[in-house]
Image: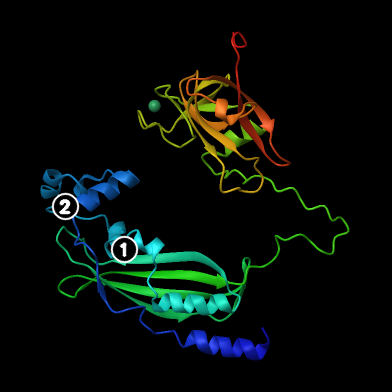
């Protein structure tokens, strides 16, 4: 874009600031216990005041309340959001960015305020305003603009119950990932697999894999094995743990074969299996060295830690034929 074009473009986008995304809209369902129960089941939230009526009535809340983090749920349109999105003002704004080359979109952050507990029967209305569009910014993702929307949530008495600020970056994807055309070497890089996320709680496990070992985390207090690595024992809640080295012997507990989408770095089809290790835990890995159509549930396998690309060591499981283990 020339500076003049940028000026025209910015005038157009900034004209959206202050516009409402649509009229205030009542959520599809009032706050209700079945949705609360399903949501808490899905996220594994066991706080009793959300689902246990007796407990809730005897608590300081005096009855069931909805988890505050469900606030946005009461405004969601459900599956129709994906299939046939509403042509609202926000979409019009995003389209304006798209046709000007700002095709990338990245949700950057959201902040939510809660003003009171929501209870079954509350009827929630939501109202979204395009609140702010930043000046042009150079980000790691590319040149772009931050768009901030504010959604106000009100109840049946028109009292505000919460507010959510949502910020996205619309950007021109930079071409840092494309092949360097100035390079003399015109062999394209062979893509590697998606790097393993190595955090505080699982970095040690991947480091052991790099050294050719498959470790299984073990609770120091009750000796229960667990995988994937996590900070606390599900049996006794101890956070003390050590590990044992797996023999990598086991059998296929279940499996699926991926054909699409073809993520770079993998040879398709990819057989992904849940392997029951003889130690008593399960691990998700690949079954290799066999036609995927011949993989069977219950099939004996033995793993090896292998280098699967330039950067990645991974456990890979091979079929075992009669007499090979022992
Ligand atoms: Zn334990």
Q: Nearer the viewer, mark 1 or mark 2?
A: 1
Can residue 45 be seen by looking at this rendering?
no
- Mark 1: few/some/many CA within 10 Å (<14, 14-19, 20+): some
Dividing the image into four equal quarters, which quarter contains ligand 1?
A: top left
Question: Which color scheme did the rendering employ for the protein?
Answer: rainbow
Query: Residue at left 81%, top 63%?
Result: 181
Query: Residue at left 31%, top 57%?
Result: 69
- Residue 94's place in the image compared with 224, above or below, is below
Q: Earlier in the sequence, mark 1 or mark 2?
A: 2
Q: Quadrant of residue 152?
A: bottom left
- Mark 2: few/some/many CA within 10 Å (<14, 14-19, 20+): many
Image quarter where the N terminus lies is bottom right
Label 1 vs label 2: CA separation?
A: 21 Å
Residue 41, how many percent across, how many down? Answer: 29, 44
Residue 100, how many percent across, how many down? Answer: 59, 79
Q: Secondary structure at mark 2?
A: loop
Residue 64 image label: 2
Q: Which sits in the foreground, 38 or 266?
A: 266
Query: Residue at left 65%, top 40%?
Result: 267
Query: Residue at left 70%, top 48%?
Result: 191
Q: Which sits in the foreground, 56 or 6?
A: 6
Counting every numbered tag in the picture gives: 2
Residue 76 image label: 1
């Amino acid at each position: 874009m020339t500076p003049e074009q940028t000026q025209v473009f910015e005038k157009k986008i900034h004209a959206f600031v202050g516009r409402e995304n649509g009229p205030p809209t009542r959520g599809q369902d009032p706050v209700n216990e079945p949705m609360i129960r399903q949501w808490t089941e899905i996220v594994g939230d066991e706080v009793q005041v959300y689902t246990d009526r007796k407990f809730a009535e005897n608590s300081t809340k005096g009855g069931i309340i909805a988890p505050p983090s469900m606030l946005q749920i009461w405004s969601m349109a459900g599956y129709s959001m994906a299939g046939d999105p509403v042509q609202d003002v926000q979409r019009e704004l995003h389209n304006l960015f798209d046709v000007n080359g700002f095709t990338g979109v990245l949700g950057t952050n959201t902040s939510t305020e809660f003003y009171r507990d929501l209870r079954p029967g509350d009827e929630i209305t939501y109202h979204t305003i395009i609140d702010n569009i930043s000046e042009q910014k150079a980000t790691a993702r590319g040149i772009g603009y931050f768009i901030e929307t504010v959604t106000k949530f009100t109840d049946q008495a028109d009292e505000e119950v919460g507010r959510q600020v949502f910020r996205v970056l619309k950007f021109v994807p930079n071409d840092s990932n494309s092949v360097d055309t100035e390079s003399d070497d015109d062999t394209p890089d062979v893509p590697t697999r998606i790097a393993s996320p190595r955090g505080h709680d699982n970095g040690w496990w991947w480091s052991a894999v790099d050294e050719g070992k498959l470790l299984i985390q073990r609770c120091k207090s009750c000796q229960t094995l667990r995988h994937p690595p996590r900070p606390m024992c599900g049996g006794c809640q101890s956070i003390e743990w050590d590990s044992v080295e797996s023999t990598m012997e086991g059998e296929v507990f279940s499996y699926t074969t991926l054909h699409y989408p073809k993520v770079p770095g993998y040879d398709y089809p990819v057989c992904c299996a849940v392997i029951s290790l003889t130690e008593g835990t399960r691990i998700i890995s690949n079954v290799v060295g066999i036609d995927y159509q011949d993989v069977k549930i219950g099939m004996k396998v033995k793993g090896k830690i292998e280098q699967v690309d330039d950067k990645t060591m991974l456990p890979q499981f091979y079929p075992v034929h009669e007499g090979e283990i022992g």
